[in-house]
Amino acid sequence: MIDDRRVWSWLIIATAIGGLLYFLAPVLTPFALSALFAYLGNPLVERLAAKRMSRGAAVAIVFLLMTMAVALLLAIIIPALIDQARSVPGYIDALHAWYDRVAAPWLQSEFGFSLTAIDPGRAFASLRTHLDDIGRFAPKLLGGLTTSGAAVIGWVANVLLIPLITFYLMRDWTHMVERLRLLIPRPLEPTVTQLARESDAVLGSFLRGQMSVVFALAAMYATGLSLAGLKFGMLIGIVAGLVSFVPYLGPVVGIGGGLISAIVTGGDIWVNVALVLAVFMVGQLVESFFLTPKLVGESIGLHPVAVIFAVLAGGQLFGFFGVLLALPVAAVILVVLRHTRERYLASDIYGAEATAPADATPASAATADTATPTPAAEAAAAASAPSAPSMPIKDAST
């Protein structure tokens, strides 16, 4: 029988940990990001260390590669974002002109649908005004941030803390895992170790494989949309690739942004739309038949619906820190549920032994059937058996 005091103790501990995570979420965000980077880089560190390289040198090489990758990504995204954000008001005017010239007459002729009550012209003008206000407000906001010492210190501290903590976590990853294992109560150590290994397999197969797919899709979408000559092509492609981390979100964001870009780019709109659809169709085919089987594997362990729910729930509860924590928690919950299901199916509550097939023949009956010969078998046995020598019958008269 389970000790009630032990159950209440574990519930109190879990509640206290959850409360600490909730209140310390803003402080823990750089640590969670660092742990994520260290977790992603540790397998490569282990491979380099296995080739007679010191762990310090392996960590330095992996850390340098990760820093270069992040810096390159930021160097591509930030200038493109700044450059193209300045021309957004002009694109709003082009979108308004396309609506008046093409979309509104087509809606009226095909469906008898008109937006005169809404006044689209006023809506576009309001949107453009707000964008202009944002453009004028952004320098003031940046200036206010630079004059706010606390904000600058916090931002700089996070930027410096993340790579520093990542380096030390990668260097001491093996020792920290071993120390955590030694803290587990000895009766629970085999079970917890098995759960941790399975959780690592589920989470690792998803994160490492899916991250590779994400960067490959970002490069593919950005290249395809840029070659198609679409405005915002590189930016839309990179964003669509990066948000592909959440299943099915990348194509939705990419096609939506690509269609708007196809309208404001100019030229033949339908050709632009066809190019957008072709880029994302090819990307989905490459992802389904090459990237996912090669980089992720046949089974990633986490269902897309579970991923979406975990990310949304984590963001709602803990903000950005919850988004980072969502997938590891989902992987652990998935593994625990698998073990719970296995124990349930093997338990007396499920009644696995009592649900034998009704047409199954008991062993004793089968033995009896095989031991009882049929008449045909008796006749065959009698014909094949050697006949006993017959005794001469004496005549009674003699």
Image (cartoon, rainbow, N blue to C red):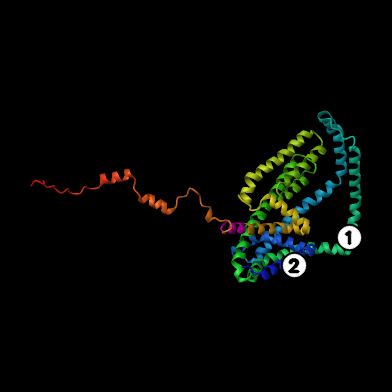
Q: Where residue 97 appears, x then y in whole percent? A: 87, 35
Residue 31 image offset from top left, x and y in percent:
75, 63
Taking depth in this image into account, of 362 and 188 the one nearest to the observer is 362
Drawn side of residue 226 relative to residue 365, left or right = right
Q: Residue placed at 84% from the left, 64% from the top?
A: 153
> Which quadrant of the view contains residue 165?
bottom right
- The numbered dot on residue 16 is 2
The answer to whether residue 63 is visible is no
Using the image as rendered, state which of residue 381 and residue 131 is in the foreground.
Answer: 381
x 86%, y 62%: residue: 151
> Crowdedness of circle 2 by 10 Å Cα count: few (<14), some, many (20+)?
few
Left or right position of 357 against 30 = left
Q: Which residue is mark 1?
A: 146
- Quadrant for the N terminus in the image: bottom right
Q: Residue at x 77, y 66 (%)?
A: 20
| Callout 1 secondary element | helix
Taking 258 as reference, is 355 above or below it? Answer: below
Quadrant in the rendering for residue 71: bottom right
Between residues 137 and 322, which one lies in front from this camera angle?
322
* Start-end of magenta stretch: 338-346
- Residue 36 screen position, x and y as percent: 71, 60
